[in-house]
Image (cartoon, grey):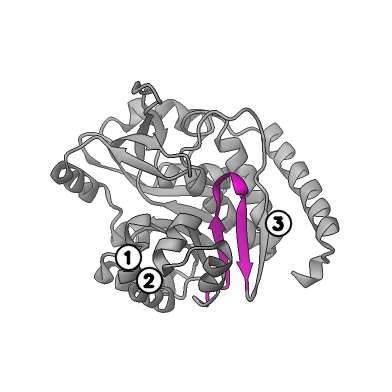
Amino acid sequence: MDFIAIGNTMTDSIMNQDGSCTEYHMGGPSPFAYAGIRIWNDSCSMITNVGEDYNALYGDWIRKNQVCTDGITVVHETTHNNILTYNEDGTYGASNLAPHDYATEMGYMEVKPEQIEQFTKGAKAVYFFFDAYNPVFWEEFARIKEKNGFEFMWEASGVTSTPEYLDRIKKIISDCKVEQFSINYPETKSLFGVDTREDALAALKTLGVPFIIMRDGKNGMYTIKGDKHYLIPSVDMGKFIDQTGCGNCSTGAAMYAYYVTRDPVMAGIMANISSGYNICQFGLTQQFTPEMRTRAEETAQQMYADYLQQHGLNKQDL
């Protein structure tokens, strides 16, 4: 497969304002990023670890959408699940397991370097949601990336988007020759110790990554290429149901779109369209159809033309 989404698979339940919870829905960084890519291209797959219950949880969706399962590995009794509570600013908290149980279960579920090496052979671009905790892991990842020759979109995990990890994040970017980077606005403020979008964007530009997205919730997404940035507005593709996974979904789509177009505006538009589909249900987009792709492509082309006209831009300037 050309485009690979690496990360955890899990199920999520959303806690409502009255304290009640929805049933568990399919999710996790890898499946959500896969869904963001799959709207645009069929040559995509996941590298992810799951529990023995994954067929009961994901089997119908996998078969209905003919999802490649080569990189899906059973490593645990159950697939990890979260209870998510959202704040007004779009941040969230996850609770379900005691800290020790959470660390143990998530440790089992993390994707290992040997899996990445095996299943990224021949890949054009790879998405990976991961933290900066383990420098040994990242040394292995840098070796694998150089060997297999893929372009890399790193979605930095919020748990290490803090000032004490900034130097390590910069080292990972340098050692792995990161071509694409994704982070949201609250995490950017935390990582660099800044308070405004202008300062956040300026700080991100110092990382030296060719293409960066800073996700900003309902406000949309900032895309950065070189010393220029663009605010791409969010897109309504249907009725809002749930925001879970929008960051992963949009980042996966942005990875694909930027690899194909090298256009920061089009990449942001395509990312926001994928996110716009993601909010239309709990969990993953249920079925990827030709009609969905046609609508997405037509919407992207119209939004792109409108954006260039509104901002007085020419395609060759981007």
Please state the extent of the stretch shown in magenta in the rendering: 208-225
The residue at the point 34 percent across, 29 percent down is: 55
Residue 203, placed above or below residue 188: below
- Say which residue label 1 marks: 132
Residue 201, placed above or below residue 84: below
Kindly identify which numbered label has been placed on residue 169: 2
Could you tell whether 227 is left or right of 131 in the image?
right
Precedes in sequence: disc 3 or disc 1? 1
The residue at the point 55 percent across, 47 percent down is: 217
Q: Position of residue 248 (x, y in %)?
A: 48, 48
Under mark 1, the amino acid is Ala
Quadrant in which the C terminus is drawn:
bottom right
Give the camera-side residue of 88 and 236.
Answer: 88
Residue 211 is inside the magenta segment: yes
Kindly identify which numbered label has been placed on residue 230: none
- Say which residue label 3 marks: 266
Under mark 2, the amino acid is Ile
Residue 216, placed above or below residue 162: above
Q: Does residue 123 appear in this view?
A: no
Q: Position of residue 301 (x, y in %)?
A: 78, 49
Residue 94 is inside the magenta segment: no
Q: Position of residue 269 (x, y in %)?
A: 68, 51
Precedes in sequence: disc 1 or disc 2? 1
Crowding near the residue tagged with mark 2, few <14, some 14–19, many ≥20 C-alpha atoms within 10 Å: many
Q: Does residue 91 appear in this view?
A: yes
How far apart are labels 1 and 2 at the CA level?
Answer: 6 Å
Which residue extends farthest left?
100
Tell me the element at label 3. Answer: helix
The residue at the point 86 percent across, 57 percent down is: 309
How far apart are labels 2 and 3 at the CA level?
Answer: 27 Å
Asked if marks 1 and 2 touch (Cβ < 8 Å), the reply is yes
